[in-house]
Image (cartoon, rainbow, N blue to C red):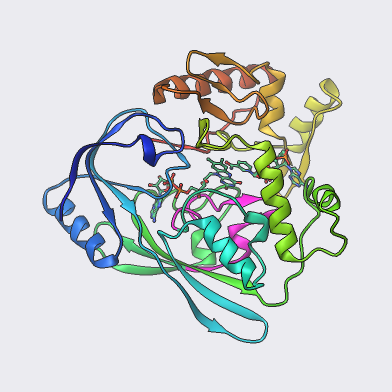
Amino acid sequence: MQFEINKPLKDFNTFHIDAHAEKFICVDNEKSLIEVLTFAKQSNTSTHFIGGGSNILLTKNIEGITILNQIKGIHIIEENEEFVLVNFSSGENWHECVLWAVSKNYGGVENLSLIPGTIGASPIQNIGAYGVELKDVFHSLEAINLKSFEKKIFTLEECNFGYRDSIFKQHEKGNWFILNVRIKLTKNPVCNIHYGNIKDELLKMKVETPCIQDVSKAVINIRSSKLPNPDEIGNAGSFFKNPIVSLSHFEALKSMYPAIPHFIATNGVKIPAAWLIEKNNWKGFKKGDFGVHKNQALVLVNYNNAKGNDILELSSHIITSVQQTFNITLEREVNIW
Ligand code: FAD
Ligand code: NAP
């Protein structure tokens, strides 16, 4: 077991924050992972996991051991005429797994094309986009308990998935390493094109009867045209969750802002956080090397050499101003380290 000492993490987080890991190691199999975890336990050292680093903001150097997950593998574990149950190892890249499924005409994840990061992080916040969430295709996951090293299968119900949420962000936070995620895909796909501008994009692509390959391509086109590429401008996608407010709160806001965009959700009314931020004039805000993206108010950015704390502080100012104007408390989606 060979640790790299004081390892720069700039290339391992999509914000490209220049923080260092006290000890750093890549693991590509379960046995090596257990060895590292055992060493950490015996030496009373903390551990931190990085997949694609696309949902973290580094505000300091990371003490203890930072483990980069590169455990790979895709295996079909069950199939019949209708479904295929696939085991994806947690270090697989999410988007490459989507492309694999789409190429085999296994439906269910095409709307989740081009989401950065790994399979292992996908259940943590129940990744979602374009009207589909991981929970819609999720079967189960296998995780290792970080104290006992025992393995446990978590069912859909046990994960308690919510909007960008799961037990792994709540009371089981920091207790498990996710090793495998099992996803149930359909062999008779039905395209879901009702969300946002997928239909318009398909029209542009001159597709009248779309298949899942078309939907994946449409989502890739839309995302590539709208979102800043982290390889060009450091960012971690949406910095805040879209808030869900009560119906009475929404009606009060609507009387003041008749054009307020909104979507009825199961537990209230969802308001796009980007609109709330834009209304407070943050869109395009830039100070030194950090700011709010000029086209996407939900995306905070590192233009070059920003510090994690600069971005964290900016997010606090945004939260305060949205609170004052709309009486809505924005919640950060990105994990602060
Ligand atoms: P990391 O950032 O490496 O880790 C995130 C957290 O999960 C950390 O706390 C880490 O310790 C923990 N973790 C990682 N792997 C494991 C594991 N195996 N076991 C236990 N804990 C683990 N998200 C969406 O939901 N929808 C989107 O449409 C979307 N679009 C994005 C677009 C851009 C441009 C970017 C930069 C991000 C976007 N995201 C989106 C956020 C991000 O891609 C997802 O949250 C993704 O699942 C993070 O994966 P990761 O491997 O990069 O996680
Ligand atoms: P958009 O299409 O401009 O819509 C803005 C927001 O309104 C979205 O965030 C979405 O909430 C909500 N919305 C739009 N149409 C909806 C509908 N038919 N039903 C319910 N809610 C609707 O959003 P965008 O920024 O370009 O992103 C497109 C999709 O990619 C969204 O699903 C978004 O969540 C996802 N995305 C996520 C990240 C991330 O880092 N988490 C980054 C980029 C894009 P929802 O977010 O609940 O869908």
Q: Residue at x 81, y 31 (%)?
A: 251
Report if residue 136 lies within the magenta region: yes
Image: 88 above or below 234: below
User: In which quarter of the view is residue 275 placed?
Assistant: top right
Could you tell me residue 22's position as x and y percent?
Answer: 21, 37
Query: Residue at 47% of width from left, 52% of height from top?
Result: 124
Residue occupying the point 72% across, 65% down? 212
The image quadrant where one finds the N terminus is bottom left
Task: Tell me the quadrant of ligand 2.
Answer: top right
In this picture, which residue range is highlighted in magenta? 120-140
The answer to whether residue 50 of the structure is visible from this angle is: yes
Residue 154 appears in which quarter of the rendering? bottom left
* Relative height, residue 147 to residue 328 (above, below): below
Up/down of 295 relative to 25, above or below: above
Left or right: where does residue 13 sit relative to residue 102? left
Split into 4 quadrants, where in the image is the C terminus? top left
Residue 130 in sight from this viewpoint: no
Name the residue located 67 percent from the left edge and 69 percent from the top edge.
Answer: 107
Q: Nearer the viewer, residue 38 or 30?
A: 30
Tell me if residue 37 is in the magenta stretch.
no
Q: Position of residue 158 (x, y in %)?
A: 49, 63
Q: Residue furthest bottom?
A: 80
Direction left: furthest residue: 43
Q: Residue 161, percent across and down? A: 55, 56
Of residues 85 and 316, the one drawn nearer to the viewer in this rendering: 85
Q: Please state the horizontal and vertical placement of residue 234, each as a whole percent of the image.
A: 49, 31
